[in-house]
Amino acid sequence: MAGRARYSTDCTDAEWQVIARLIPEAKPGGRPEQYPKREIVNAIRYVVRTGCSWRLLPHDFPPYRLVYHYFRTWRLDGRWERLNDDLRALVRERAGRNAQPSAAILDSQSVRTTEKGGLVATTGPRN
């Protein structure tokens, strides 16, 4: 974060302490990392929170292609899901509850829309 203005979407130090253990270190023997992982996470959070496209990521973040690469890699390896699970457990424990929920509620609803389906139902008669 040195060298750039702070965004409201940046990780606080406390948030980073929780997140950092789930972010992988650089592979040994590879090229040295050019950008800190915290900056990568801050850039991902910026895109997710603002809804901007990857290409519109402000230039004071790491290059958008690198940021997207990490976002996609971590999505495919389940890292974001694990992070969400860990954060949910932490919030539950801090609220004095068991880390894992003991019950769930499923709700479903069926709504009849029309007797006919497909194009007949959506396009209507032609005059």
Image (spheres, grey):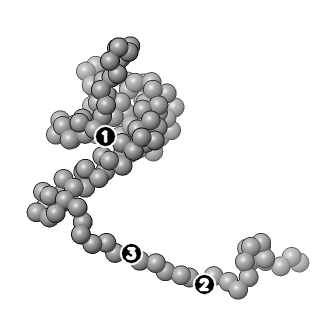
Residue 1 appears in the rendering: yes
Which of the two labelled residues, at mark 2 and mark 3, occupies the earlier sequence position? 3
Q: Secondary structure at mark 1?
A: loop
**Number of residues whose C-alpha sits closer than 10 Å to that of mark 3, classed few (under 14), some (14–19) or many (20 or more):** few
The mark found on residue 106 in the picture is 3
Which of the two labelled residues, at mark 2 and mark 1, occupies the earlier sequence position? 1
Residue drawn 47% across and 33% down?
A: 68
The mark found on residue 96 in the picture is none
Query: Does the residue at mark 2 contact the one at mark 1 (Cβ under 8 Å)?
Result: no
Which residue is denoted by mark 2 in the rendering? 112
Separation (CA) of disc 2 from disc 3: 20 Å
Residue 47 appears in the rendering: no
Q: Nearer the viewer, mark 1 or mark 3?
A: 3
Residue drawn 63% across and 82% down?
A: 113
Screen quadrant of the N terminus: top left
Separation (CA) of disc 2 from disc 1: 42 Å
Q: Nearer the viewer, mark 2 or mark 3?
A: 3
Screen quadrant of the C terminus: bottom right
Q: Position of residue 52 (x, y in %)?
A: 47, 40
Is 47 placed above or below 81 here?
above
**What's under tag 1, amino acid-wise?**
Thr
Which residue is denoted by mark 1 in the rendering? 9
**What's under tag 3, amino acid-wise?**
Leu
Q: Secondary structure at mark 3?
A: loop
Is 105 displayed left or right of 86 in the figure?
A: right
Q: Position of residue 90 (x, y in %)?
A: 18, 53
**What's under tag 2, amino acid-wise?**
Arg
Q: Secondary structure at mark 2?
A: loop
Is 82 placed above or below 57 here?
below
